[in-house]
Every structure is written in C-alpha cells, then in structure tokens.
C-alpha cells in the first residue's frame, strides 16, 4: 500500500473521493451552523458518516491499485 498512489487525477475514483470529501465537509458545516429538527440532523449525520466510510474505501482501493504500464 503506497500513500503516493492516492493522487491519481486520471482515475475517476480519485475525483469521486474529492467530491465525497467536499460533500462531507458541506454536510458537517450545515450541521454545525444551522438549527435543524432532530430527524433532519440524524439523516444528514448518517449521510456524512456514509460519505466518510465510502471515501475511506475508495482511498484504500486507490492506494492498493497496481500500476499498469501500457
């Protein structure tokens, strides 16, 4: 597993990882700055946690991805 393999601009998974991180940050900001009903807070928190877990999974896949020389 190589940390340097995490940055792969030509791989669509890299851009999905960036989008998920941005979405998680936006959801966290909304949860901290807005006074929302409890049910909405729980739903948004669930989405944020799912985004983080999916982002971790994608990051591990990118780091474990073998380099194919073409």
Image (cartoon, rainbow, N blue to C red):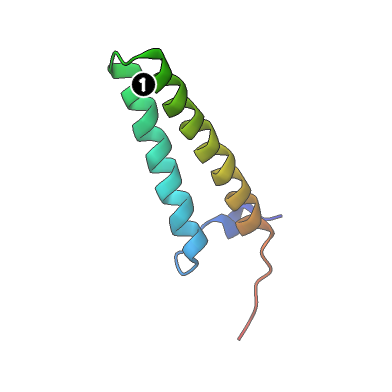
Vertical placement of residue 14 versus 69, above or below: above
Q: Position of residue 32 (x, y in %)?
A: 35, 18
Q: Position of residue 64 (x, y in %)?
A: 69, 59
Q: Quadrant of residue 29?
A: top left
Quadrant in which residue 30 is drawn: top left
Image location (x, y in percent) of residue 19: 40, 49
Figure quadrant of the N terminus: bottom right
- Residue occupying image coordinates x 43% and y 57%: 15
Decide if residue 8 is in sight here.
no
Residue at the far front: name it.
39
- Which residue carries the number 1 mark? 31
**Is 34 left, or right, of 46 in this rendering?**
left
Residue under the image location 50 percent in, 29 percent down: 46
**Total residue callouts:** 1
Q: Quadrant of the C terminus?
A: bottom right
* Front-most of residues 33 and 7: 33
The answer to whether 15 is drawn above or below residue 49 in the figure is below
The residue depicted at 46 percent of the width and 69 percent of the height is 10
Determine whether, in the image, residue 1 is placed left or right of residue 43: right
Neighbours of disc 1 within 10 Å: few (<14), some (14-19), many (20+): some
Residue lying farthest to the bottom in this orientation: 70
- For this rendering, which residue is in front, 5 or 29? 29
Residue 61 visible in this rendered orientation of the protein: yes
**Placement of 66 over or under 42, stated as above or below:** below
Disc 1 element? helix
Q: Position of residue 21 (x, y in %)?
A: 44, 42
């Amino acid at each position: 597993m190589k940390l340097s393999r995490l940055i792969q601009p030509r791989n669509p998974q890299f851009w999905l990882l960036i989008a998920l991180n941005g979405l998680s940050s936006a959801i966290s900001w909304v949860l901290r700055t807005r006074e929302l009903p409890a049910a909405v807070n729980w739903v948004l928190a669930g989405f944020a946690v799912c985004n983080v877990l999916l982002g971790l999974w994608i990051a591990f896949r990118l780091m474990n991805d073998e380099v194919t020389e073409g």
